[in-house]
Image: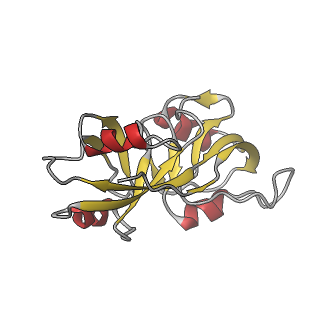
Amino acid sequence: PTPVFSAKRGGQFTLTVERQPVKAGFDVTDGKSLMIVDGATAAELSPKTGPSAGRSLQLNDRIVAANGVSGDAALLMKELRASSLWELTVQRPTEFRAVIDRTGYPSLGLNLQFAPNGTTLMITGVNEGPVQDWNNRSQDHKIAKFDRIVEINEVRGTSKLLLDAARDETVLNLAILTYTSEPFA
């Protein structure tokens, strides 16, 4: 079958935020960034005053740098706790869709990781299988390492719900988030 494609645009931007109480609304599965996993965290971190006022963070945005610190999720959290003014570099994802038919395959050929509080399945590897076949046919997008599955067969929610939605299904309609670059860029 022909790859199915649709997308919403993403990108990277910086914003300045005065210190806010940071709750556990982050997914740190990639070990390199802080992905926002709930609307409350997005609202808490959105600037209320200053040059970035009115610029809102959104669910699934990921903070890749804070005050020049990047490449390590634990160090990012430490910097957020230590500083009263944050200069954040944020990546906003692009969402695309892929229809994967796994008829005749024992697995999708994906390596996945997910956070207990997460709402995505992070792809850590693409191996031989129907996803790799889809990638070979797709001219618009490739499913790749660090992409995140956010919907399977019209189900969004916790990582467990996503995994349950794929169980015993032959055709998977996936919504996937991809970012402009790897999380440590």
Q: Using the image as rendered, state which of residue 148 and residue 1 is in the foreground.
A: 1
Query: What is the quadrant of residue 135 in the picture?
Result: top left
| For residue 72, above or below residue 163 | above
Q: Is residue 172 above or below residue 109?
A: below
- The x, y position of residue 176, in whole percent, is 45, 53
**Foreground of the two, 159 or 50:** 159
Q: Is residue 178 left or right of residue 153?
A: right
**Could you tell me residue 145's position as x and y percent?**
40, 36
Front-lying residue, 177 or 115 = 177
Left or right of 54: which side holds 45? left
Residue at left offset 45%, top offset 43%: 138
**Residue that protrudes farthest toward the right in the picture:** 51
Q: Residue at x 74, y 50 (%)?
A: 18
Q: Residue furthest front?
A: 1
* Residue pictured at 82% horizontal, 58% vertical: 53
Residue 160, located in which quarter of the rendered image? bottom left
